[in-house]
Amino acid sequence: MTWTVTPERFDSPDAALLRRDYYDEVASRYWGRPATVEEIADGLTDDGSELLAPPAGEFVVGRLGGAAAACAGLILMEAGIAELTRVYVRPEARGTGGGGRLLGAVESLARALGVRQIRLDTRNDLVEARGLYAKHGYREVPAFHHRNQYAEHWFAKEL
């Protein structure tokens, strides 16, 4: 099976379900128990997803063998800088190269938009994500914001 990664509206049916699955996983891992339907809905309410659409940003969906299996978002910040967010690969598709394909697609979109640096934040418990970023050239940097109470690691990559 092969991966394809293409821009897609953040609120398309596939993208919305991937964003929901992303939030379910990160919330469940943080709390150490399955997140409830209500907690997931609350987390997705006013989560800033509208920034994942032009002109503020982009959203991509990765498909493995045609089935939606991954997503990532890009939010344009200050001039030449963008933030990578909502990077997610469904568990059954992990280890098949989807994470790298997502990052490559987002970086290509960012370059086309004049972005020179991509930044992101993540948590201690998201070990796989930190490994993915390091493997693809993101380096850990000092905190560049304090707006996210869950952020524990900050990364950046020059494009």
Image: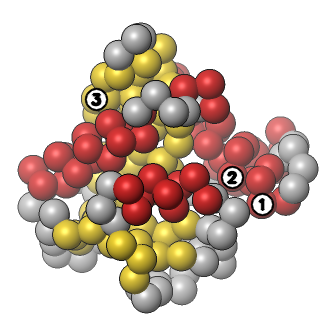
Relative to residue 10, is residue 22 drawn left or right? right
Decide: is 19 above or below 116. Answer: above
Label 2 Cα neighbours within 10 Å, binned few <14 / some 14-19 / many ≥20: some
Label 1, label 2: how many angstroms apart (C-alpha)? Answer: 6 Å
Q: Position of residue 14 (x, y in %)?
A: 50, 23
x and y percent of residue 43 in the render?
70, 54
For residue 35, say whether it is visible: yes
Q: Which residue is drawn at the image coordinates 48% and 21% (left, top)? A: 68
Mark 1, secondary structure of its residue: helix
Q: Which residue bears the numbered disc 3?
A: 6
The residues bearing labels 3 and 2 have C-alpha atoms spaced at a distance of 23 Å
Mark 1 sits on what residue? 30
Q: Earlier in the sequence, mark 3 or mark 2?
A: 3
Task: Indicate the quadrant where residue 97 lies.
Answer: top left
State how many labels appear.
3
Task: Name the kind of residue labelled 1 in the image.
Answer: Tyr
Look at label 2 and name its amino acid: Val
Q: Is residue 41 left or right of residue 122?
A: right
| Cα gap from disc 3 to disc 1, whole angstroms | 29 Å
Along the viewing direction, whichever of 74 and 120 lies nearer the viewer: 120
**Displayed quadrant of residue 9:** top left
The 10 Å Cα crowd at callout 3, few under 14, some 14 to 19, many 20 or more, is some
